[in-house]
Image (spheres, coloured by chain):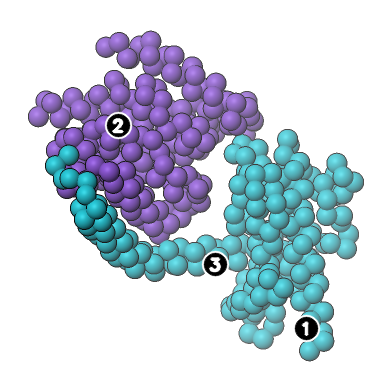
Chain colours: A cyan, B purple
Amino acid sequence: MAVKSNLKNMVLCLTAVCLVCSALLAGAYSLTKSPIEAAAKAKTEKSLSAVLPAFQTVEESVMDGTRYYTAKNGNETVGYAIESGTIGFGGPLTLMVGIASDGTVYNTSVLSHNETPGLGAKCTSDKKFMDQWQGLDPAQKILSVKKDGGDIDAITASTITSRAYARAVAGALDVYKKIMEGESHE
Amino acid sequence: MSNRFKLITDGLVKNNPTFVLILGMCPTLATTTSAINGLSMGLATLFVLVLSNMAISAIAPVVPDKVHIPAYIVVIATFVTLVQFLMQAYTPAMYETLGLFIPLIVVNCIILGRAEAFASKHGVLDSACDGLGVGLGFTCSLTVLGAVREMLGSGSIFGWNFLGGHDGMLAFVMAPGAFICLGYLMVLFNKFLKKS
């Protein structure tokens, strides 16, 4: 190495390296900030249109730490989309649960998960599992897997993921009830 | 010229990071659940490796010995964060799949290893070739490992299912399958390629 390791050189070198690097990062951050936000927004919109009936406007609100979206056609509310999280097999599992104005589940979509590929990760691709949530009426069905005495068909070999999914949907329905109570008080 | 070409092929075969040097096992085992995941992890690492090798070979002469590790780590971390921003902005789906393993490229032994063993002692262009070679070696190994695990474990290749919706041998998608596949691929690699 060409440069002597005395205090002055070391301080100068590290300061210079850190300055250049942070300048680079600041530049990259400001350049990618809007595409990153756009990507996150596109994702939310995509999941909203997947889990709700056709709507014109959507409003974001937060209740007890849960984010939910109210979808409207003019003045008429067509449904709510509720972000509901729980712990799956591999970590947090977050769903977007769409609830139609009659209180039934319209559709669900996975926002993020850490489930095992080929097993629990099928909760994003297994058609039979995903379709059973459409039009599900919480008054008629018990929201737990058949193994636990409920009405939900679990994904083969992924009972824990299926249980978590059912729990998240049930959680969203609880939030929906609270939203309804809140509105009837107004 | 031929010397630089050799640097690239060395990284692919003689110094293959996965099958010969056995470095960077954490991302290797964890992200190769499918061919496409392996490929994108490899490419992200390749990108960081080439840039960090070039930057480090350029600054090495003015970095005092006692602080070379912190200086190199800052450089590497900068490039990793750049990759993270770019992936988050332009390939959000991929970013979510690889998630935690992108920031972890910082502590990938391959990158600091090449910086120490090669880039700090060679010129910018040679270091770029070395980074390209080792990065390609890493990318190929991860893609092959991912493809084998995906074929055995999920019955598909690059997401295309050839078993008609039936399940594969699920163990291969999980950690034990990763070790088994890696072991066999290492044996095959060393038997047929390393000697030449």
* Tag 2 residue: B134
Question: Which mark, residue A45?
Answer: 3
* Residue B96 place in picture, x, y as percent: 51, 51
Which numbered disc, 1 or 3, marks the residue closer to the eye?
1
Q: Secondary structure at mark 1?
A: helix
Would you identify the image quadrant in which residue A175 lies? bottom right
Which numbered disc, 3 or 2, marks the residue closer to the eye?
2
Both marks 3 and 2 on one chain: no
Left or right of residue A92: residue A148:
right
Categorize mark 3 by other alpha carbons within 10 Å: few (<14), some (14-19), many (20+).
few
Determine the CA span between mark 1 and mark 3: 25 Å
- For image coordinates 52% across by 36% down, the residue present is B30
- Placement of the C terminus of chain A among the 4 image quadrants: bottom right
Determine the CA span between mark 1 and mark 2: 61 Å
Would you identify the image quadrant in which residue B155 lies? top right
Q: Secondary structure at mark 3?
A: helix
- Placement of the N terminus of chain A among the 4 image quadrants: top left
- For image coordinates 73% across by 37% down, the residue present is A156
Which numbered disc, 1 or 2, marks the residue closer to the eye?
2
- For image coordinates 30% across by 31% down, the residue present is B134
- For image coordinates 72% across by 73% down, the residue present is A64
* Tag 1 residue: A183
